[in-house]
Image (tube, rainbow, N blue to C red):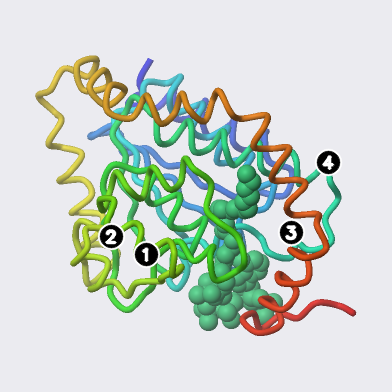
C-alpha cells in the first residue's frame, strides 16, 4: 500500500491525530502526485528532542515504512531551528525511567531512519546541533539553508557521541574530518558544512531546498525499489546491527552516565552559559 491515494492519506492523518494527545508534534503530508511524504517537526520552540517528540518521530517512521513510502523529506516548522537536539532540561536532574525510555526511543529513531527502505532527505532549514545533526545525518541527503550551524557538539557539553552516531558522521565526511569535528565538538556554518561534505547542497529559501530535495528523490524513479533498498541495507546494515546488538547495554551506560553528579554539574553549567532559559534553583 502506498501513500498515493487519498484513502491512505486520510488513514495516515487519522492515525497521527489519534496518536497525539496535544496535537501532533510531527506533521505529515503526502504529495499525491509524487508519493513523497514531508514530515515537519513542530515542537515549540526549537524541536528539542524529548520523549514525546522522539516517540512521535519513531511512530511516523514506522507508518511510512508500513505504507511503502516513496520518499521522505524531513524538515522543521521553525524558520530558525531544525532541531536543537536532546531536550537539555529533560536531561537535568532526570527521572531514571524516563531517561531510559528517551535513550531507547532515540536509538529506535536512528535505526528506523538510517535504515529506512525508502530514500530520505533532510531539508535543514535552521540550526542543527547534536541530535539535530543526528536526524540530518541519518537521512541520505542534506540540503541546508544559509547562515545556520550544524554539527555534533557533544564534546563541548561534556560527553562523547555514541558509536552509531560516530559511524554516521564517519560514513558521511570520512574518518579524518570526523575525528577533527568530533573531538572538538565543532559546529559548522552552512558553507563550512558544504565544504567538508556534511551537507550536500545549500539553498537560499525553503522552497528552493524542497525543490532540490525532490530532485534528489526523483533520481530513484527508475531504480527498482527493492534493488535500491537492498543496496542501502548492504551499505548501512553493519552499523545498524552493531547498535541492535549493543542496544540494552548502551541504554544502561547512558542512564548511569547521565544520572552521575559530575555530568549533572557540567550540564548545569552548559545550560547556564548557553541557553536563555535558566534552571530553577
Ligand atoms: C554509552 C553511553 C554514552 C553516553 C552518551 C551521552 C549522551 C550522548 C548524546 C548524543 C546525542 C545527542 C545529544 C544532544 O542532542 S545534546 C543537546 C545539544 N544541544 C545544544 O547544544 C543546543 C543548545 N541550543 C542552542 O545552541 C541554541 O538554542 C540554538 C542554536 C539551537 C538556537 O539558538 P536561538 O538563538 O535561535 O534560540 P535560543 O538560544 O534563544 O533558544 C530558544 C529557546 O529554546 C531553548 N533551547 C534551546 N536549545 C535547547 C535544548 N537543547 N533543550 C531544551 N531547550 C532548548 C532555549 O532555552 C530557549 O528557551 P526560551 O524560549 O524559553 O528562552
Contact (Cβ within 8 Å) of mark 2 with mark 3 = no
Q: CA distance from mark 1 to mark 4?
A: 32 Å
Q: CA distance from mark 3 to mark 4?
A: 12 Å
| Side of 159 where 170 appears, left or right | left
**Residue at 40% over, 31% down:** 239
Residue on which disc 1 sits: 181
Residue on which disc 4 sits: 97
Residue on which disc 3 sits: 91
Identify the mark nearer the N-term, 1 or 4.
4
Q: Nearer the viewer, mark 3 or mark 1?
A: 1
Which element type, helix, strand or loop, lies under badge 3? helix
| Side of 255 where 194 appears, left or right | left
**Residue at 24% over, 59% down:** 209
Inspect this view and state whether residue 181 appears: yes
Identify the mark nearer the N-term, 3 or 4.
3
Which element type, helix, strand or loop, lies under badge 4? helix
Q: Nearer the viewer, mark 2 or mark 4?
A: 2
Q: CA distance from mark 2 to mark 4?
A: 36 Å
- Residue 96 at x, y percent in the picture: 84, 46
Q: CA distance from mark 3 to mark 1?
A: 24 Å
Q: Counting other residues with Cα less than 10 Å from the Cα at mark 3, is it few (<14), some (14-19), or many (20 or more)? A: many
Identify the mark nearer the N-term, 3 or 1.
3
Looking at the rendering, in which quadrant would you find the N terminus? top left
Q: Is residue 116 above or below residue 192?
A: above
- Residue 49 at x, y percent in the picture: 61, 54
Contact (Cβ within 8 Å) of mark 2 with mark 1 = yes
Inspect this view and state whether residue 24 appears: no
> Does ligand 1 reach within 8 Å of label 4's beta carbon?
no
Residue on which disc 2 sits: 177
Amino acid at each position: 500500500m502506498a501513500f498515493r491515494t487519498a484513502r491512505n492519506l486520510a488513514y495516515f492523518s487519522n492515525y497521527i491525530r489519534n496518536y497525539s494527545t496535544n496535537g501532533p508534534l510531527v506533521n505529515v503530508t503526502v504529495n499525491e502526485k509524487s508519493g513523497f511524504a514531508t514530515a515537519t517537526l513542530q515542537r515549540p520552540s526549537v524541536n528539542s528532542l524529548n520523549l514525546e517528540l522522539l516517540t512521535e518521530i519513531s511512530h511516523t517512521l514506522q507508518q511510512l515504512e508500513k505504507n511503502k513510502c516513496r520518499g521522505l523529506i524531513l524538515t522543521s516548522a521553525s524558520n530558525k531551528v531544525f532541531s536543537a537536539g536532546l531536550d537539555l532540561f529533560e536531561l537535568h536532574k532526570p527521572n531514571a525511567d524516563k531517561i531510559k525510555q528517551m535513550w531507547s526511543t532515540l536509538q529506535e529513531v536512528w535505526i528506523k531512519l538510517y535504515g529506512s527502505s525508502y530514500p530520505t532527505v533532510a531539508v535543514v532549514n535552521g540550526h542543527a546541533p547534536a541530535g539535530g545533526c543526528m536526524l540530518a545525518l541519518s537521512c541520505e541527503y542534506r540540503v541546508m539553508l544559509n547562515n545556520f550551524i550544524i554539527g555534533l557538539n557533544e564534546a563541548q557539553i561534556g560527553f562523547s557521541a555514541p558509536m552509531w552516531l560516530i559511524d554516521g558522521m564517519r560514513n558521511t565526511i570520512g574518518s579524518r574530518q570526523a575525528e577533527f569535528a568530533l573531538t572538538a565538538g565543532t559546529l559548522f556554518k552552512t558553507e563550512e558544512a558544504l565544504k567538508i561534505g556534511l551537507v550536500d547542497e545549500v539553498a537560499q529559501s525553503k522552497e528552493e531546498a524542497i525543490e532540490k530535495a525532490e530532485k534528489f528523490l526523483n533520481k530513484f524513479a527508475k531504480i527498482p525499489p527493492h534493488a535500491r533498498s537492498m543496496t542501502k541495507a548492504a551499505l548501512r546494515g553493519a552499523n545498524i546491527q552493531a547498535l541492535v546488538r549493543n542496544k540494552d547495554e548502551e541504554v544502561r551506560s547512558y542512564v548511569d552516565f547521565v544520572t552521575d553528579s559530575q555530568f549533572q554539574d557540567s550540564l548545569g553549567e552548559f545550560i547556564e552559559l548557553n541557553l536563555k532559559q535558566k534552571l530553577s534553583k
